[in-house]
């Protein structure tokens, strides 16, 4: 009986410490698409009713282009204006476009027998 009580108290203390660490560190970080769309809302005057479609579109785009969009959330967080946020988005878009163009020409070269 005593051993079970000690185990229960120990588990309770561990859970309490975990909950305390969660509160102190601010919990979970927001998803990158939430960060981007929140910055668009804050700096560019995006309408609140556009937020849900923004996060859905951004999540889908980030999933299709994980390498190209790496660091996008950090970029928009550091941006201080709508122009800065737009520049971050344009840069990530051009980066993914560049990767696609490279793949296109490599595929075309293979199809034409050029190595």
Image (cartoon, rainbow, N blue to C red):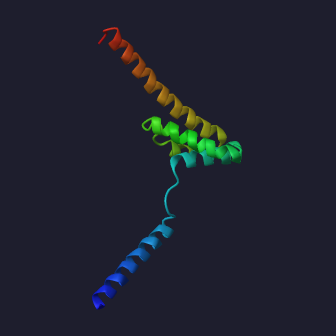
Q: In which quarter of the image is residue 15?
A: bottom left
Left or right of residue 12: residue 74: right
The answer to whether residue 49 of the structure is visible from this angle is yes
In x, y percent, where is residue 62?
Answer: 49, 39
Of 110 and 81, the residue lying toward us: 110
10 or 41, nearer to the observer: 10
Residue shown at 49%/59% (left/top)? 28
Task: Determine the residue positioned at 70% across, 46% down.
Answer: 49
Up-down relation of residue 19 to residue 69 (above or below): below
Q: How many labels does the image show?
A: 0
Task: Name the residue furthest bottom.
Answer: 2
> Where's residue 111, x and y in %?
35, 11
Quarter of the image for the N terminus: give it: bottom left
Residue 50 appears in which quarter of the rendering? top right
Question: Farthest residue in the front direction?
Answer: 1
Along the horizontal axis of the image, is 51 left or right of 21?
Answer: right
- Residue 30 point in image, percent of width and height: 53, 54
Q: Is residue 10 left or right of residue 35?
A: left
| Residue 78 seen anywhere in this rendered image of the structure | no
Q: Residue at x 38, y 76 (%)?
A: 14
Can you give x and y, in whole percent of width and height, for residue 114 in the image? 31, 10
The image shows residue 54, relative to residue 29, as above or below, that is above
Taking 12 as reference, is 29 above or below it? above
Q: Quadrant of the C terminus?
A: top left
């Amino acid at each position: 009986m005593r051993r079970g009580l000690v185990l229960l108290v120990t588990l309770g203390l561990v859970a309490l410490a975990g909950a305390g660490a969660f509160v102190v560190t601010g919990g979970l970080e927001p998803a990158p698409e939430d960060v981007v769309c929140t910055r668009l809302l804050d700096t560019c005057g995006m309408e609140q009713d556009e937020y849900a479609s923004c996060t859905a579109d951004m999540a889908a785009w980030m999933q299709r282009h994980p390498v190209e969009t790496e660091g996008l959330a950090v970029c928009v967080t550091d941006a201080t204006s709508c122009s800065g946020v737009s520049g971050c988005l344009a840069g990530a878009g051009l980066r993914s476009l560049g990767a696609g163009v490279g793949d296109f020409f490599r595929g075309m070269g293979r199809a034409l027998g050029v190595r």
